[in-house]
Each structure stands twice: as structure tokens, then as C-alpha cells.
Amino acid sequence: MLNLGEIVQTVKSIVETRIGIIKNEIQDEFVTILSRLILLVIIGSLVLLVFLFLSLSLAFFISQVTQSPYLGFLIVALMYVLIVLILYLTRDSHSVQESINSTLKDFIFRAKSDKKEDE
């Protein structure tokens, strides 16, 4: 007959093993999400630099075409004001918010769904 102490010890070791497995899974998911967030920040910074240099190039080009040293920068600035105004007016749009949310969720949490598909 089995000893009650052995059963308790076996159940205890099974629970401790399961807790260890869950800890490792949580750590893996956290590291994956953190690395994707860092990658998102790096990509965002590089895109910002690209837009900065493209904006400066466009401003200088328009300045040369109009033969006015400031008009190109004014036109580019007004273009950005128009974009900000459009974004401000659509800030409460549920479709815009849902598309941004789904894009971010897909980018950040996609690794988890990719792992499940691979299995």
C-alpha cells in the first residue's frame, strides 16, 4: 500500500514542476514582448529620421523651385499642419482606433500566435 507521505511528496513535486514550467513560459513571453517593443521603438525612430530628411529635402526642393528661401519650408510646415488637423478631427473615430490597436497587437503579440501555429 502507498504511504500517504509519498503521495503528498509526489503531488508537491508535480505542482512545483508545473509552477516552474509556467514561470519559464511567462519569462519567455515577457522577453518576446519586450524585444518586440524595443524593435518597435527602433523602427519608429528610424522612420522619424527618414521623414525628417525627406521633409528637409522637399522643403529645399520647393524653395529652389519657387526661388524663395523660406516658401518651401512654409509649404512643408503647412502640409504637416493639415495632417495634424486631419488626425485631430479623426481622433475619436472608432475605425482609426481599432486599426491602430489591431496593428500594434499584431506586431507585438504575433510571436505568440506564430509559435502556436508552428506546433
Image (cartoon, rainbow, N blue to C red):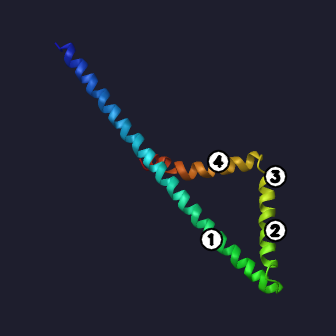
Q: Residue 117 at x, y = what percent?
A: 47, 48
The first of marks 3 and 4 along the sequence is 3
Which numbered circle lies on residue 50? 1
Instruction: Tell me if label 3 and label 4 are in contact, CB under 8 Å.
Output: no
Q: Secondary structure at mark 3?
A: helix
Q: Residue 87 at x, y = what percent?
A: 77, 55
Q: Which residue is mark 2?
A: 78
Which numbered circle lies on residue 101? 4
Instruction: Tell me if label 1 and label 4 are in contact, CB under 8 Å.
Output: no
Q: Is residue 11 left or right of residue 41?
A: left
Instruction: Identify the image quadrant of the N terminus.
Output: top left
Which numbered circle lies on residue 75? none
Please give the name of the residue rendered at 77% of the width and 59% of the height, measured from the top-left corner: 84
- Mark 2 or 4: in front is 2
Q: Is residue 104 left or right of residue 55?
A: left
Q: Which residue is mark 3?
A: 89
The CA distance from mark 2 to mark 3 is 16 Å
Other residues around mark 2 within 10 Å, as few (<14) / some (14–19) / many (≥20): few
At label 4, which amino acid type do we have? Asn
The first of marks 1 and 4 along the sequence is 1
Please give the name of the residue rendered at 77% of the width and 72% of the height, measured from the top-left corner: 76
Other residues around mark 3 within 10 Å, as few (<14) / some (14–19) / many (≥20): few
The first of marks 2 and 4 along the sequence is 2
- Mark 1 or 4: in front is 1
At label 1, which amino acid type do we have? Val
The CA distance from mark 2 to mark 4 is 28 Å
